[in-house]
Image (tube, rainbow, N blue to C red):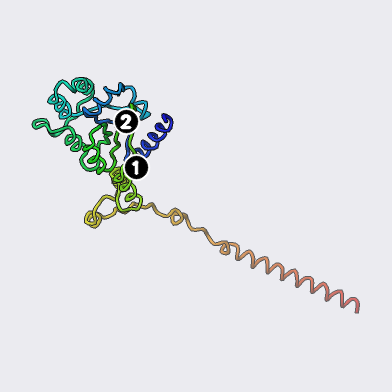
Amino acid sequence: MKIKRQKQAKKTISFYKYNFSFREPFQILIDGTFCQAALKNKIQIKEQLPKYLMGEVQLCTTSCALKELELLGKQLYGAKLILQRFQVRKCPHLKDPVCASDCLLSMLQETNPQHYFIATQDHTLTSGLKQIPGVPLLYIILNTVVLDKPSSASLQRVQDVQLGALVSPSQQQSISSLKEEQGLGRTDGDKRGRKRKRKQSNPNPLSCLKKKKKKGGPTAPLKKTEDGEKKKRSRHKRRRTEATDNKTM
């Protein structure tokens, strides 16, 4: 069962890495209910979570979650001691604290831009988390930590992106950066207002060459002389032939 659970966790993590740009160290928001369950089941959160998620983690909480444990009294004193060891992230409820479930939901907003994992045992909170795409959910069951499968909202978001109906935030950033590199981010007004500067072109090297003299010019009279000599030679030969003919007569 342990090997099967590890394989399922690896598959789920790769899903969030590929589709929602999750990267190490994984940020895990923890509330008091998860710490209380870990204390009952003797689970060492700092040791087991990095092994289970196969990567570096940052364990964190909010001031509202700590305040909630303080109000609940001595029954959750041990969970409070565990939760105080983690980093405290700023939430918008410093002056007016709210319950931990509402605080964690507000930290995720609509698209979980900070890429938080949520570790909780609160059923009302988990039902709200499953409505937000791209939120990995951790909980404790049967003395073990379990990473829940991707919710239907996450699967639907991935399907919409693949069909071209939506563009993920990471893809939007990459597209905008590519446009800036290629100079395609300007509007039509900017394109019309700016004229392209023509590059100064060098003259054609073939036009700078000196004109060659024609070959027929200087050699023409020589040809005439050669023709004349040939004609003289041919006449001389004719005379010799005539003289020989007369002798024979």
Quarter of the figure that contains the C terminus? bottom right
Find the distance from the CA under tag 2 to the CA under tag 1: 27 Å
- The kind of residue on which mark 1 rests is Asn
Q: Position of residue 157 (x, y in %)?
A: 30, 47
In the image, 173 versus 246, the foreground residue is: 173
Residue 150 coordinates in the image, percent (x, y): 33, 41
In the foreground, 123 or 209? 123
Q: Which mark is residue 163?
A: none
Screen quadrant of the N terminus: top left
SS at mark 1 in the image: helix
| Residue corresponding to mark 1 | 19
Instruction: For residue 6, say whether it is visible.
Output: yes
Going by the numbered disc 2, the residue's amino acid type is Ile
* Residue 155 locus on image (x, y percent): 33, 46
Q: Which residue carries the number 2 mark?
A: 141
Kindly report which numbered mark, 2 or 1, lies closer to the viewer in this rendering.
2
Q: In the image, what residue occupies the spot 60% across and 62% down?
A: 219
Q: Is residue 222 left or right of residue 34?
A: right
Q: Quadrant of residue 67?
A: top left
Q: Is residue 181 visible?
A: no
